[in-house]
Amino acid sequence: MANVKKGSGSNAGGMISGIIIVACVLIGWAIWTFLMGAPSNFEGGDPEKGHPLNTLGMVYKGGFIVPVLLGMLLMVIVFSIERFIVISKASGKGNLDQFMRNINTSVTSGDIDGALAACDKQQGSVANAIKSALVKYQDVKKEGFNSEEASETIHKEIEEATSLEMPMLEKNMTIISSLVSLGTLGGLLGTVSGMIKAFGALASAGTPDQAALATGISEALINTATGISTSVLAIIAYNFFTSKIDDLTYSIDEAGTTIVNTYRHFRGSLKQ
């Protein structure tokens, strides 16, 4: 039943991500067509033949790849906001560092009930995983396992709890990482197509026109600038969220180690 629910949740999440991607591309196309391609941005009110009067008109002249790049830029922004909200909730309601200090202090002093109360107050993925380990700690303590059996049992519980929480934390990170490369490649594709168009128009004219060539090259390079901007933002977002996820995972491992060491000390004191 758990696998069925997990599969259903993954399918629903994938469908939502697909809808967001399509929506971002459509919004990018709308911005390119109606905002950047507005007649007021061009001489004579002609977006196709008129000379651009401002930056919006210049970007519009970048060609068909511009709305795709705008869609990618929107994807980075939307998925970054979504990841920020999810990871913030995973950290819990209070300060994570203070929560970890309280957990370590409570566990070390043997106040497991206090640690459980702190987890209930903190909430979030980290608190849920630590609470599972604490509950397992109480179980093995009642059953009288030796230190090695307890260590293995508690470690297994922590790993299972972490494996349940990690997919939620890492969801959509693949999309952000993919946009790092796609942004640059899309910008280069737009630049190359623009350069081909510019030199093709120059060749058909028969006589060199430096102004027309310069205009064509500048319009083509707009795609490179847009693509690089998308990639830079995606790199920053990916590294930031990866660091946050690593911090959460480290916090869970740190608490697990403290719980295991506390149990070993408890069993050792009984043998003395």
Image (cartoon, helix red, strand yellow):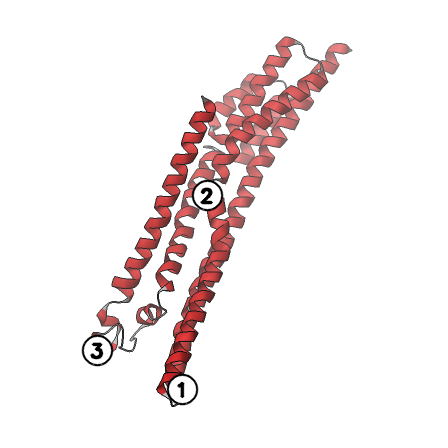
- Amino acid under disc 3: Gly
Residue depicted at x 48% and y 58%? 231
Q: What percent of the width, then of the height, locates residue 28?
A: 33, 57
- Amino acid under disc 1: Gln
For label 3, the residue is 44
For label 1, the residue is 210
Q: CA distance from mark 2 to mark 3?
A: 45 Å
Q: Quadrant of residue 105?
A: top right
Q: What percent of the width, then of the height, locates residue 6?
A: 45, 29
Quick one: SS at disc 3? helix
Camera-side residue of 47 and 111: 47
Q: CA distance from mark 2 to mark 1?
A: 46 Å
Quick one: SS at disc 1? helix
- Amino acid under disc 2: Asn
Among the two numbered marks 2 and 3 on one chain, the one whose residue lies closer to the N terminus: 3
Q: Quadrant of residue 5?
A: top left
